[in-house]
Image (cartoon, rainbow, N blue to C red):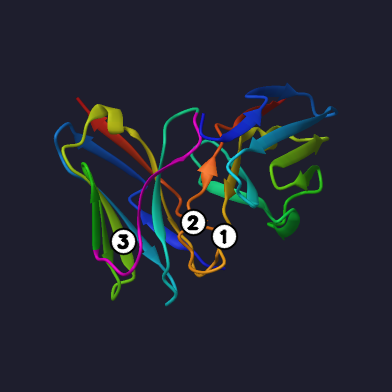
Amino acid sequence: ETGVTQTPRHLVMGMTNKKSLKCEQHLGHNAMYWYKQSAKKPLELMFVYNFKEQTENNSVPSRFSPECPNSSHLFLHLHTLQPEDSALYLCASSQVLLTGSENGYTFGSGTRLTVV
Amino acid sequence: QQQVKQSPQSLIVQKGGISIINCAYENTAFDYFPWYQQFPGKGPALLIAIRPDVSEKKEGRFTISFNKSAKQFSLHIMDSQPGDSATYFCAWSGGSNYKLTFGKGTLLTVNP
């Protein structure tokens, strides 16, 4: 384990279902991220949270709804998804630095989502 | 929007050979340049990183070279092994104190 735990590891859902992805980190980091990784495509940044506040939403459709109740937990609520939303969803965390920017991300292992 | 241009998209190397992946960043801010390695079914993991105050950093068979004037940084994998077969991402902090901008990735295949 990397210190960032994502559950579930695999999820199959119908287009009318509602489900949630969970991410938890115990690294003391205060920034958390959701990324989408489709087959043979680059990492796509979806959402950024900095000290529990959402600081970035990269034009993500409203069928994806993030929630960050505290600096250790991050959720991605899913509803009425489309088949093209099938992908690996990765959570990451990092430390917000006061000075400098030597800042490595720690990624979770991801949730493999299949929309049928 | 800041970008990091990574090349090549895919790379095939024979065992024992040298793998070279290049990245170029866009503006004059330079901070921190990490490389990530991702195996199938796993999340990316930090491999090696460099700050701009040095031109090269080596960890085992992995070396980062940084060329400030050309705004480029490269990953060299010496004596490449089949176990190195993975997708490699370069990243750049771009002046942010918490967010990274990632390249599009390079799929490395090392043939035995």
Q: Secondary structure at mark 1?
A: loop
Asked if residue A111 is positioned above or below residue A51 in the image, the reply reads above
Q: Tags 2 and 3 in contact by the CB under 8 Å rule? A: no
The residue type indicated by label 3 comes to: Phe
**Residue on which disc 2 sits:** A103
Q: Are marks 2 and 1 in contact (CB under 8 Å)?
A: yes
Q: Residue at x 29, y 72 (%)?
A: B70
Quadrant including the N terminus of chain B: bottom right
Q: Where does label 3 land, which residue?
A: B73
Q: Which residue is mark 1?
A: B98
Is residue B50 inside the magenta stretch?
Answer: yes
Q: Residues within 10 Å of mark 2 (few under 14, many from 20)?
A: many
Q: Chain of mark 3?
A: B
Q: Nearer the viewer, mark 2 or mark 3?
A: 2
The vertical placement of B54 against A36, above or below, is: below
The residue at the point 54 percent across, 66 percent down is B96
Q: Residue at x 84, y 27 (%)?
A: A17
Dividing the picture into quadrants, the one containing residue A55 is bottom right
Instruction: Give how far across and how far down residue A36 sits, in percent.
Output: 61, 42
Of the residues shown, which amino acid type is indicated by label 2? Answer: Asn
How far is disc 2 from disc 3 in space, using C-alphas?
A: 17 Å
Label 1 or label 3, whichever comes before in sequence order: 3
Residue A71, x across and y down, in percent: 70, 47
How many numbered discs sit on the rendered protein? Answer: 3
Q: Quadrant of residue A27?
A: top right
Is residue B43 inside the magenta stretch? Answer: yes
Tell whether B110 sits left or right of B91. Answer: left
